[in-house]
Image: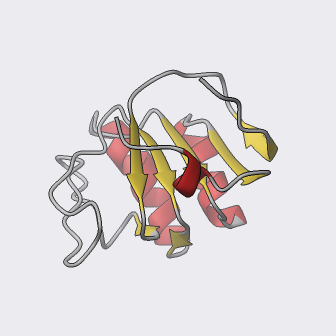
């Protein structure tokens, strides 16, 4: 076990299975809002479920619609438990806060390189 420290974090502490994405995620274009399956063609997580996973993400894509999509995923019972970003933006953080999903970024070590799926 190891500890990653982040400059920015919001939400409660959660535990769960990690799902590491080598690509940035666009919550509107890359994830089916009803199933939580990554559907983005060519995405490193294509065909995988984000449901109840702690997503370790290279970056954020999208804007206000993507933030709303996070809330829609949670409302459909298929959202992630947590979001760890290599780098995110304020809109994605707001989406996570409104949806009640813990979110972190600004790590001292790259979470995408340091954490393995599973």
* Residue 23 vertical position relative to residue 19 in the rendered view, above or below: below
Q: Position of residue 58 (x, y in %)?
A: 53, 65
Toward the viewer: 12 or 77?
12
Question: Residue 46 falls in which quadrant of the image?
Answer: bottom left
Residue at the spot x=31%, y=44% of the render?
50
Locate residue 22 relative to residue 115 in the image: left or right: left
Q: Is residue 18 left or right of residue 11?
A: left
Q: Quadrant of residue 52?
A: top left
Query: What residue is shown at x 23% (from left), y 72% (from top)?
Result: 40
Extreme residue in the right direction: 7
Q: Position of residue 38 (x, y in %)?
A: 23, 59
- Label count reads 0
Q: Would you identify the image quadrant in which residue 39 lies? A: bottom left
| Side of 101 relative to 81 (left or right) | right
- State the colouring used for the structure image: secondary structure
Q: Quadrant of the N terminus?
A: top right
Against 90, residue 8 (above or below) is above
Residue 102, compared with residue 15, is above or below; it is below
Q: Position of residue 83 (x, y in %)?
A: 54, 45
- From the viewer's side, name the closer residue of 27 and 107: 107
Residue in view at x 42 percent, y 65 percent? 22
Question: Which quadrant is home to the C terminus?
Answer: top left
């Amino acid at each position: 076990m190891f500890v990653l420290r982040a400059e920015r974090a919001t939400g409660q502490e959660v535990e769960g299975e990690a799902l590491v994405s080598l690509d940035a995620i666009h919550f509107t274009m890359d994830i089916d809002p009803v199933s939580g399956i990554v559907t983005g063609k060519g995405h490193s997580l294509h065909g995988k479920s984000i449901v109840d996973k702690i997503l370790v993400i290279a970056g954020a894509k999208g804007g206000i619609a993507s933030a709303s999509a996070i809330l829609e995923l949670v409302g459909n019972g298929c959202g992630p438990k947590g979001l760890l970003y290599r780098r995110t933006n304020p809109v994605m953080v707001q989406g996570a806060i409104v949806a009640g999903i813990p979110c972190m970024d600004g790590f001292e070590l790259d979470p995408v390189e340091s954490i393995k799926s599973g």
